[in-house]
Amino acid sequence: MDRFELLKSLSEAFGVSGFEDEVRNLFEDRLSGFATVKRDRVGSVVGALEGDGPKIMFAAHLDEVGFLVKSITKEGYLKIIPVGGWWEGVLPAQRVVVKNRRGEKWLGVIAAKPIHELEPEERKKLPKMKDLVVDVGVKKGFEIKERLKIRPGDPIAPVSEFTRLGNPDLLMGKAFDDRIGAGLLLELAERMPEHKNSIFLAGTVQEEVGLRGARTCARMVEPDVAFAIDVSISRDGPGEDGEERLGGGVGIVIHDRTMIPNRKLRDWVISLCEVNKIPYHLTSITGGYDTGVIHISGFGVPSLAIGIPTRYIHSHIAVVDERDYENILKLLILISERLDRQRFQEIMS
């Protein structure tokens, strides 16, 4: 499977937080060809490549933002509960898929009033989440509950095709947060260099609802050093003029809501980039990464988050630059090779 097909399969897979089975199976099947794979009891997957050096954990979360069915109206519309962070402005008229308890999937659309029906004041306001509903084929005489076997608690995911844009460097699809990270870990496993370290590649679950899978993974692995491989926010969209942009290289996260990284680890990774001519930039976000809980597990774990600049996250579509993906992969290979016991002691000193 080439990179495009790998990322397409990961991106398009169903995997709302708490319902990651489909994407987890894809990740686990591919990872098991290169590593010894285990699951924790929450559902995260860890592939181990054992050595006698430091235990290095790379984590990427498998779950995506989505919704749950809250209730079903008498007409058959599905009222929804957000899973993860959503802005209502990106939701009306978007395609979704509902997965019932039998594993059957039903396409739907988030209902939206035509502009012709909106009062002048309504046009100035965003819809509220509590007022949004999903239409899965509502029609008088068609019993949604009975025919489609949908009930409250069933998960709902965005629907979007993974593709390459007219600019061939740019990839577009859903759930890049964090299926891009999952793809990087799988390619790292495939291209893993000779090393003496113990490498643990973790596909975590329920990151979008509180970093839950990372917490249990950290207890299972007990890493010496940890890295979260995730998205960061590209600030080169319409009306923006930030330093972080597509094609800007590796995002080294200097601050987020859940962690201030280990300074010596951060500076060593920066030096790796500079010596090996890997483009990078320093970034920060208001959210958090899996390292937010990993770094305070056990007696503490030196940790760092690494992000790929991404446009339009937490919506039905995101865009990344494949050159950034390749540069992050180069960096992860170098970290795996060179973060030996001596380097670890220097970081801890």
Image (cartoon, grey):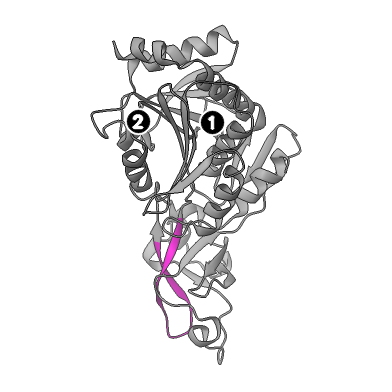
- Give the image location of residue 91, x and y in percent: 50, 57
Residue that carries the numbered disc 2 in the rendered image: 256
Q: Quadrant of residue 108?
A: bottom right
Residue furthest front as drawn: 52
Residue type, label 1: Ile
Q: Is residue 281 magenta?
A: no
The answer to whether residue 259 is seen in the rendering is: yes
Question: Which mark, by number, is residue 308?
Answer: 1
Residue type, label 2: Asp
Please say if 140 is above or below 213: below
Q: Which residues are magenta?
A: 66-81
The C terminus - image quarter? top left
The answer to whether residue 110 is seen in the rendering is: no
Question: Which mark, by number, is residue 212?
Answer: none
Q: What residue is shown at x 39% (from left), y 32% (from top)?
A: 285
- Give the image location of residue 281, x and y in percent: 50, 18
State whether the magenta stretch is mostly helix, strand or loop.
strand
Please say if 77 is above or below 3: below
Residue furthest bottom as drawn: 141
Q: What residue is shown at x 47% (from left), y 53% (from top)?
A: 89
Q: What residue is shown at x 52% (from left), y 69% (from top)?
A: 99
